């Protein structure tokens, strides 16, 4: 992992690599996290996760909230004249780049960015590459992203909006977070687009794009009305059941999920509060549903013990820490069979983990043999 990758994200960021044989970071190995009975539909299984400790996250704003209110602005780096922050200060910016956008947070609340959020517009649609906190009333910051729309480099709008229906599905999101390689992100987008089109069988209303290949744009493919319906049909039973569970489990502090597709545990998302989970849940569940639709794998049952074991595994042999002093710390724990990402807020009055992602390598955790499998 190179320092140059992180240098795009702003000043005051330190990258440290640690070698260790046994590593516990963030809250992932804490016995306070408990996996509950799953909710399943088709080959998608979601395990709710509760905890004994949560935190007040009402002081933060999400990207959807910020863009909707106009308080958060995302634009190409090469906009003429740069961005202005305040009446006197002009911030110079470089020319437009595929893997870079400029963001300014004019809100009086700090902004949470999650890897996998898709911003549409500008010269290309992009996916956010990593979790991050942007301070309130920030200067413009250079935002590291990856393109999810190969082939377009013409501006459709001055500013960006967010993909309303979902985040990037795990197979695309993981390439941005782990591989940090544009070609691998493009490859995963192409595979996902092709798979969702292939899943639209005649019985579901004829082939989606019978006369031509699917669009290269991830956002356009998954924003198609028929695709959105297919994903909604897959996600709705789980979304409704878990939304009801969140309400019922509010006293137990439901804060996240462990995700299995086709009998393989692939992902976990944990948040600092039930309220923060509820904000992201509609887009997250659709991203998991998209992964289930685009994964051809026979369904096999996954037990609560399997999911708990996956969540509890924390031993790593290397860790990379990025820190913007007084704002946030983002760590990546690297193990032979998983990656663990922890975003902690360092803002005054916080000092807790905002979001934790755990990603199983390759095909995910296999409960049949009790270890991670590789292709």
Image: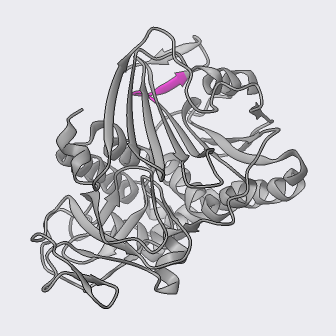
Does residue 130 appear left or right of residue 359 in this picture? Answer: left
Q: Residue at x 13, y 70 (%)?
A: 96
Query: Which of these two is toward me, 16 or 212?
Result: 16
**Left or right placement of residue 299 versus residue 126 in this view:** right
| View extreme (left): residue | 95
State the residue at coordinates (68%, 28%). 301
Residue range in magenta is: 360-365
Q: Nearer the viewer, residue 170 or 74?
A: 74
Residue 225 at x, y = what percent? Answer: 46, 76
Magenta-colored stretch includes residue 32: no
Q: How many marks?
A: 0
**Which residue is situated farthest in the bottom direction here?**
87
In the image: residue 321, left or right of residue 267:
left
Above or below: residue 48 compared with residue 349:
above
- Colour scheme of the rendered structure: one colour
* Res 208 visible: no
Q: Choose between 100 and 44: the one closer to the eye.
A: 100
The residue that appears at 47% across and 55% down in the rendered structure is 114
Q: Residue 151 appears in which quarter of the rendering?
A: bottom left
Q: Is residue 304 above or below residue 138?
A: above
| 197 over 66 or under it: above or below | above
Report if residue 372 is visible in the image. yes
Q: Residue at x 41, y 14 (%)?
A: 317
Looking at the picture, how far across and down is residue 10, in whole percent?
A: 28, 56
Percent coordinates x, y for residue 226 in the rendering:
47, 72
In this rendering, position of residue 328 left or right of residue 182:
right
Q: Is residue 339 above or below residue 197?
A: above
Residue 31 percent across, percent down from the top left: 76, 25
């Amino acid at each position: 992992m190179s320092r140059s990758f992180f240098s795009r994200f702003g000043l005051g960021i330190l990258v440290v690599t640690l070698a260790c044989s046994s590593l516990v970071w963030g809250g992932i190995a804490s016995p306070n996290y408990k996996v509950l009975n799953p909710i399943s539909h088709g080959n998608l299984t979601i395990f709710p996760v509760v905890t004994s400790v949560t935190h007040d996250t009402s002081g933060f704003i999400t990207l959807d909230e910020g863009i909707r209110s106009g308080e958060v602005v995302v634009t190409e780096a090469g906009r003429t004249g740069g961005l202005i922050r305040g009446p006197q200060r002009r911030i110079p910016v470089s020319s437009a780049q595929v893997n870079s956008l400029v963001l300014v947070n004019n809100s009086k609340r700090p902004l949470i960015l999650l890897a996998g959020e898709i911003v549409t517009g500008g010269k290309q649609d992009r996916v956010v590459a990593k979790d991050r906190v942007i301070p309130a009333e920030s200067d413009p910051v250079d935002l590291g992203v990856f393109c999810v729309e190969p082939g377009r480099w013409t501006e459709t709008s001055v500013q960006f909006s967010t993909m309303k229906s979902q985040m990037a599905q795990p197979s695309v999101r993981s390439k941005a977070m782990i591989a940090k390689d544009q070609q691998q992100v493009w490859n995963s987008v192409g595979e996902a687009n092709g798979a969702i089109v292939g899943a639209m069988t005649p019985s579901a209303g004829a082939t989606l794009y019978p006369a031509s290949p699917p669009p290269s744009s991830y956002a356009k493919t998954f924003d198609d009305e028929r695709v959105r319906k297919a994903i909604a049909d897959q996600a709705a039973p789980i979304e409704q059941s878990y939304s009801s569970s969140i309400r019922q489990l509010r006293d137990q502090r439901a804060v996240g999920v462990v995700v299995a597709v086709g009998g393989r545990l692939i992902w976990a998302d944990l948040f600092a509060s039930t309220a923060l989970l509820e904000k992201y849940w509609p887009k997250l569940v659709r991203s998991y549903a998209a992964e289930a639709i685009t994964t051809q794998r026979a369904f096999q049952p996954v037990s609560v013990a399997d999911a708990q074991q996956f969540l509890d595994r924390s031993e790593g042999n290397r860790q990379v820490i990025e820190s913007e002093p007084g704002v946030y710390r983002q760590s990546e724990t690297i193990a032979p069979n998983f990656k663990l990402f922890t975003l902690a807020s360092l803002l005054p009055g916080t000092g807790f983990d905002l979001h934790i992602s755990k990603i199983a390598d390759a095909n995910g955790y296999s409960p049949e043999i009790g270890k991670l499998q590789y292709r």
